[in-house]
Image: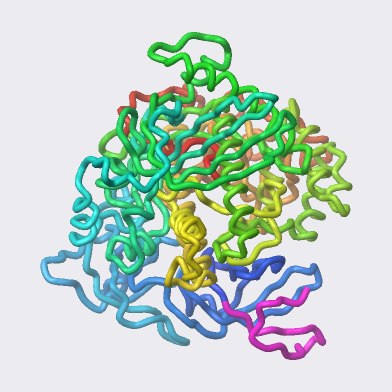
Amino acid sequence: MRPHWKKKETRGAAGGHEAIVEGVIQHKGTFAFLLSEKPGVEDVFIRGRGLDLAMDGDRVQARVRPEKTGRLAGEIIAVVKRARTSMVGILKRVNNNWVLFPEKGNAPPAIVSGFAPKIVPIEGAFAVLEVTRWPAPGAGAAGLVNEILGDPGDMRARIDSILRARGIKENFPPEVVAQAESFGARLEPAQWEDRENLIDLPICTIDGADAKDFDDAVSLEDLGGGMLRLGVHIADVAHYVKPGTALDAEAYARATSVYLPDRVVPMLPPALSDNLCSLVPRQERLTMSAFMDINSSGKVVKRRLAKTVIRSWRRFTYDEIQTMLEGGKVPDVHKSIGEAVKRMGALTDVLYKRRVARGALDFNLPEYRINADPHGRPLGVSLRPRLKSHRLIEEFMLLANEAVATELFAAKRPFLHRRHDNPDPLKLKNLSIALGELGLTAGHIEGSNAAKGLQDVLRQAEGHPLTTLINSLMVRSMRQAVYSPESEGHFGIATRFYSHFTSPIRRYPDLMTHRAVKALLAGTKENHTALPLDKAGVHCSERERAAADAEHKSVDIMRAEMMKELVGSIMDGAVTTIIDSGAFIMLGDTGAEGLLRVNGLKPGMKIKVMIAGVDTAEGKIDLSLEGGRPPQAAQGQQPQGNGPRQAGGGKGRQRPPLNFARVARNKGRGGGRSRGRGRGKGR
C-alpha cells in the first residue's frame, strides 16, 4: 500500500516504493507508531535508531515503505515539531551525575544539567525536567529540573507524573478563571430574549449517580400518527467561550476533559462546567437544541436546529430511569415526564434495531470502575452494569450527532467530522485467523461487507465463555476514530455523516460544531473559527489520545497496586494478545492483564498462572506458569472458557482472593468516567 500523505517518493534498494511522510508519533519505547492523518491510510510502524531523536507526541518525518506482510514500516529521519517542552521521569544518580529516566518505559534518559531554585534533588523521586537540549545523534536530551512530584510509592504523585508526562495541566491560569467567573452565577431573562423558549417543555437530564455536571438533556413529544419529536438539548458553551479569548485558547490547548479514578481534569473552569453550562434542575440554561421528527420505523423524517433556553424539570440517574423502564416507581416524577420516559424506552428499541440493521457494531466489553479515597489510594474495583437506560442516552446522543452533521454537510458548511475509517484488511485477516482458532466462523469478515460479517461474529460471541476476549480482539482490530474536516463516514456507527455535538463542556470539537451550527442559523458565510480545521482535527485527536492514555495508565497502576497483595497466588487466565516476548493474559474477573514471557500460546487459551511480580510504578504485572509447567492448550488442546474463579494448587502460595467486585464508599470524587459522562455519550 502506498501512503497518500507522502512528501515525496523514491525507489527503495529492494525495489519497493519508499515515501517520506510526516505525522505525529505515539512512542512505545522500543517502537512507535506514526499516526495517519488521511482517510483510508494506516498508521506506520516505526523502529530504528531514529526513535532516540523523538518523544511521544512529536511531529516527525519518516522514511516509509511497505513490508512483505503489507504493513507500512519506517524510520524517523527528522523531528519537525516538539509536542512539549518538558519530560517527566524518575531521578537517579549515575556516575555522580543526575539523570532523569522518562516515565514512558524504554525511552532514552535525559541528563540533568541543573535544578531550579529551592528544588532539592531526591533519589528515586518523580521529577519534571524542562528541556534545554533536545536529543540528537550521539547525544541525549538535557535540561533543568523545576519540580519534584514525589515518591513513586505515593499514588497521587504517580498520577501527577502521568498527567505531566502527557502535557495535561490541572490548574487554570488566573486570567482564564477570572473570565469564566465574569459571567456571574445566574441568568437573567434578558439573556434569552432572542431564543426559542422551551422552559415549559418536559425536559430532563439522565446521568450517573455521582455526576457533577450535566451538559445534555432530552425531551420526547408525541406528535400523533406514530410520529415522535426527540429533542436533544446541549449546554451552549459557545455563548461563553468566544474565539480569540484566553478562555478559548485554554480550552483549545486542553481539547478534552480527563477522567481519572481519583480526580477529573476539566476542559473548562468550574464556573462554567459546574454551573452556567451545567443543566441543573429548575434553573434556566442557554442551550443548542437538535429536534428530530421520527416515524414509527425509527426513520428521521425532519431535523431542526435552534438556539434555545430550557429549564430541566428533573435530574434522573441511570438507575432511576432503569426502574421506570421496568415499570417501577420513582418519587417526585411529573406525570408528563413519566409518560415521556415510557415513550423513550420504546423509541430506544426501535432506534437500536434500525442502527444494527444498517451495519452498526455494538461491542460488549465490561467497564470497570476504580474507586479511590481522597488521597488517591485505590479502594476497590467494581464492574459497571450495562443498563437499557445507558443505551437510551447512547441512542439519542448518536442520533443528535448524526443529525447535526447531516444538516451541516447539506448546507455545505465546513466542520470537524468524527471520522472512523473502514478496518485495515490485513488486520481483518489476522482477526479472522484468531477468531477461527477460538472455534468461530469468521472468514466472511474479510468480504465486501465487513460490517455484516463482524455483526455475525458478535452474535456468535453472545453466551460464549470467551465473549469478553472475542469482543476485545475485535475492538483492537478497528481503526481509531479521529477528528477531520474530511470523512467518508463512521464505520462503527454505520452512518455517512457524523460529528461530535453533544458534549462541548468536555470536548473542544463539540464546541467547534456548535459554532458551525450558530453560523448556519445566523445565515453568515464567515468562518466560525480562526483555526484551520485540518490543524484543529490533528490537535484534538492527539489530545484525545493523550487523555485516553492517561486514563488507561492510571487505571493500570491502581489495579496493579491492589494486585500486589496477590503476588505468589495462582489465578485462572486467558490469552488475549501475542507479542514477540510472550503473551498478555486476562486475569479472571479482575479486568487486569499481565505479561507471561512464554511463547507458543494462542489467543483464547485457558491457562493457570502465578502472579510473579507487580511494578506499581509502571502499572505492570508479571506472570509465570503455575509450577513452571507449559499450559495444556499450548500442547495442541482446544482453548476453553476462562471462568473467573480463583484457582488453587501448584506451588504458588494460596491467599484469600482480592475482592475486585466490592463497591467502595464514594462521595463523587472523580471515580473514573462518571462525572458528566455516561456510557455511549457520543463515540
Q: Quadrant of residue 380?
A: top left
> Vertically, is 509 above or below 309?
below
Residue drawn 50% across the image and 17% down it: 338
Q: Quadrant of residue 363?
A: top right
Q: Position of residue 318 (x, y in %)?
A: 48, 25
Quadrant where the N terminus lies?
A: bottom right
Residue drawn 38% across the image and 32% down it: 199
Tell me how many marks there are: 0
Q: Is residue 594 magenta?
A: no
Q: Is residue 3 magenta?
A: yes
Which of 87/199 is in front? 199
Q: Position of residue 57 (x, y in %)?
A: 47, 69
Q: Is residue 276 left or right of residue 494?
A: left
Which of 479/504 is in front? 504
Residue drawn 48% across the image and 18% down it: 336
Residue farthest to the front, as pictured: 193
Q: Is residue 52 left or right of residue 604?
A: left
Q: Position of residue 327 (x, y in %)?
A: 56, 10
> Vertically, is 666 above or below 474?
above
Say if residue 377 shows up in the picture.
Answer: yes
Residue drawn 58% across the image and 30% down it: 392
Q: Is residue 365 left or right of residue 466?
A: left
Image: magenta residue range: 1-22
Q: Position of residue 165 (x, y in %)?
A: 37, 61
Say if residue 627 shows up in the picture.
Answer: no
